[in-house]
Amino acid sequence: MAMRNAYVDQFPAEAKVIKAAFWSSFLALAIGGLLGLVQALHRTDVVRFIDSADYYTVLTAHGVLLAITFTIFFLVGIFTWAVTTSLERGVVDTRFTWSWYAMMVVGTVLVGVTIFAGFLEDAPEILGAPLNADVLFTFYAPLQAHPFFYVGLVLFVVGSWLAGVDWFRTWWAWRGENPDERIPLPTFMVLTTTLFWYICTFGVALSILVFLLPWSLGIVDSVNPLLTRTLFWYFGHAVVYFWLMPAYMMWYIMLPKLSGGKLFSDPLARVVFVLFLLLSTPLGIHHQYLDPGIAEGYKFIAMTNTMFLLLPSLLTAFTVVASMEHGARQRGGEGYLGWLRALPWRDPVFTGMALAGLMFAAAGFSGMINAGMNINYLVHNTWWVVGHFHLTVGTAVALTFMAAAYWFIPQVTGKALWNRSVALGQVLLWFIGMTFMSNAMHRSGLFGMPRRTAEPQYSGFEFEPAAGTVGEINAQVALGAVILTVSLALFLLNMVLTSFNGSSDAIPDNTYAGTLSGPEDAPEILDNLKLWTAIAIVLVIFAYTLPVASIVENGGLFGPGIEGQQLTLVPDTATVLETVREVMP
Amino acid sequence: MSSATEQRTTDQATETDSGETGPVRTIGHDEYDPIGTLILIAIYFAILVLLWLFMYFVEFLGNGPTVVGTLVTVVGLA
C-alpha cells in the first residue's frame, strides 16, 4: 500500500489542535442543537417542560453556543488547516496555537456557565450580582448580563484575534522563504476573512469594554442602548460572513475536487473575498431599519452597501456551480442539465456541501427581502428572520461544516469514517428537516408571527392567515426540529464512533482543488492586503461616523440614565389573553 | 499555479471511496463551456425576480400598514 499522506501525517502537531477545536465545536453543536429542539417544541406548544421564563435562557444558550461557539471553533480549525496545507509549512510555534485555543475555551466556559446559571432558582451572587445572562445572542441593553458573560465573550474574541495573528505569522514566515510567490488561494481566503474580522470585532469590543462591562460592574450608571446596539450590529452582520467565508472556502477549494474537476477561476475567488473584506462591515445598520434615532439616509447607505454584496454572492454561485459542472463533465456528464446526474451524489461530503449551497440560494432570496428598507417592515422581528438565518448559518454554514467534518476528521485523526451511508443519510435529513422548519418560519413571518416569543398562542380569537393555519405552521416547525435533532444525533454518533476506530491506511491524501484559471491570471493588486484593508476602513468611516456621532449627540455617550434589567417573567396566561382580547375582540 | 501549491492541489478527484467513478476525461480551460451553469443561474435569477415581485406587490403593498393599524385599533380610533 502506498504511503499515507493525510494531514495528520504531514502536520501531526497542528492536527492535534485542529482536532481539539473540532471537538469543542461539536460539543457546542450538541448542546446548542438540543436546546433548539426544546425551544421549537415549547414555542409550538407540543411539549412544554421548562418554565416559559426559562425559554429565554434556552434561547440565549442556543444562539451563543451555535452562532458563536460552534461556528468559530470549527472555522479556526479549518483555517489553521488551510494555512498550513496551502503554505506547506507548520505554524510558527504550536505553543502559541494552543494558547489561543485555550483562551477561547476559557471564554466559552465562562459564558456558558453564566448563561446556564440562569436555570437556577437562586443563582449564586458573584461580584455583587446574580450569575445569569438572559440577554439573548444580541445582548441589547437595557438587558444586562453578569460581568462574567461579557468577560467570557471578550476572552473568546481575543482568542480568535490571536488565532489570526498565528495565521498571519505563518504567512509572513512563508513569505520570507518564498518572496516572489502569489499567496496560495486558501491562505488568501483566510487572511482576507481575518482582516475583516479584526475590523468588525473592534465594534463589539468597544461596546463591551467601554460600555456594557463597566455598566454591569457598576462603574458607570448608564449606557446609551442605541449606541451599544449600533456597535453590536457593526459587528453583528460581519460576523455572519465570518461564519460564511469558511463555508465559501470549502465550496471553492473542496467541492470542485469532490465533483471530479477543478476550480473554474482562482482570480474570481480572490475578487469575491476582497469584496467581502471591503463590504462586510459598513452595512450593519440594515439590522436597524426599524430603530428610531437613526436617520433614514444612513439606513439607505447601509442598504446600498448590502445590495452590493449580492455581487460576490452571485459570483460565488457562478464560480462554484461552474466548477461542479466541470467536474461532472469530466466524469462523463452530458447535456444542458444532464451533467447534474454525473455528480457524486453518494458522497456525503459532496452532497452535504451541495445541498448547503442550494439552501443558501434560497436564503439569498429571503436575505434580499430583509435587506430592502421598505419591504423589511413586512418581516422585521418576525419568525421570517429566524427562518432566514436557519438557512444561512443553520444550513449553508452548519451543513457545510458537518459535511466537511466527514473529510476532515479522518484527515486530522488518521481514522476512517465510521459509516459513510449514515453520513449521507444525515446530510439528507438535515436538508429535509430544515426545509420543513425554515419554510414554515418564513411563512409565519408573513402572518406577522413574532420571533423570540415563548408562547405565541394564537388561540382564543379568530386568526385566519391567507394560506395555511398557525397549527399547520407549528406542526411543520416541530416536525422539522425533530428531524434536525435526529440528523444531529447521527452526525455526533458518526464522529464519536469514528474516534473509536483504529488508524487506517485508506485515508485520502490531503489535497484541495486545482484551478482551470490559476493565480497567474489574477492581477497582482488583488494580493495587496494593505490596500484593501485601507479601503475597507475608509468605507467603515464613511458609513458609521455620522450615524454614531448623531446617536451620541442625541442620547449622550452613556445614555439618559438607563439602568440594567435582569429578565424576569411571571407567565400569566389569563392576563395575556385578556390583553389580546382587548386588542382583537 | 505556484510551485508551492502544486503538490497540495489535485488535478482530478482521486477520492473514490464513496464508490463513485472518477473522471473519465480531461477538459481544459479553453474547451470548457459552462452552459449548464448559465442555465441554472438564469433559472435562479428568474425565481428571485418573480418571488421579489410577489413579495413586493402582493405581500408588501397588498397588506395594510399593520403596525399603525393595530395601534389605531388599540386606542379606539378605528
Image (cartoon, rainbow, N blue to C red):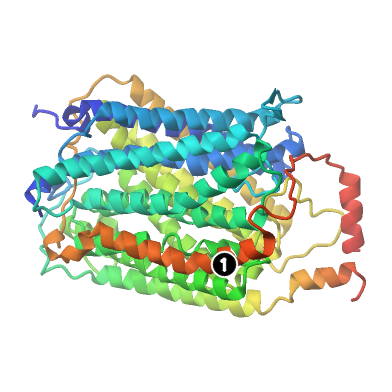
| Nearest the eye: B76 or A564 | A564
A259 above or below A545? above
- Indicate the quadrant containing the N terminus of chain B: top left, top right, bottom left or bottom right: bottom left
Of A198 and A427, nearer the camera is A198
Q: Please identify the quadrant where the C terminus of chain B is shown.
A: bottom right
Residue B31: quadrant of the picture: bottom left
The numbered mark 1 sits on a residue in which chain? A
Q: Is residue A28 above or below residue A256?
A: above
In this view, A326 is above or below A417: below
Circle 1: element type: helix
Q: Is A397 on the left-hand or right-hand side of A120? A: left
Give the side of residue A417 with respect to residue A368, left or right.
left
What residue is at 53 percent from the left and 75 percent from the top? B52
Q: Residue at x 36, y 38 (%)?
A: A162
Place of residue A581 in the rendered image (x, y in percent of width and height, measured from the top left): 90, 58
Q: Can you tell which quarter of the image residue A405 is in? A: top left
Q: Is residue A199 above or below residue B14?
A: below
Let me know if residue B16 appears in the view.
Answer: no
For mark 1, does the 10 Å Cα neighbourhood hold few (<14), some (14 to 19), or many (20 or more) residues? many
Q: Position of residue A112 (x, y in %)?
A: 57, 31
Q: How many marks?
A: 1
Which of the pair A582/A183 is nearer the observer?
A183
- Residue at 50%, 38% (x, y): give it: A154
Q: Quadrant of residue A446?
A: bottom right
Q: What residue is shown with label 1?
A: A547
Q: Position of residue A465 (x, y in %)?
A: 73, 65
Question: As rendered, which of A234 and A434 lies closer to the eye?
Answer: A234
**Residue at point 73%, 32% (across, down):** A49
Q: Position of residue B30 (x, y in %)?
A: 10, 69
Residue B47 in view in this figure: yes
* Type of amino acid at the residue the image marks with label 1: Pro
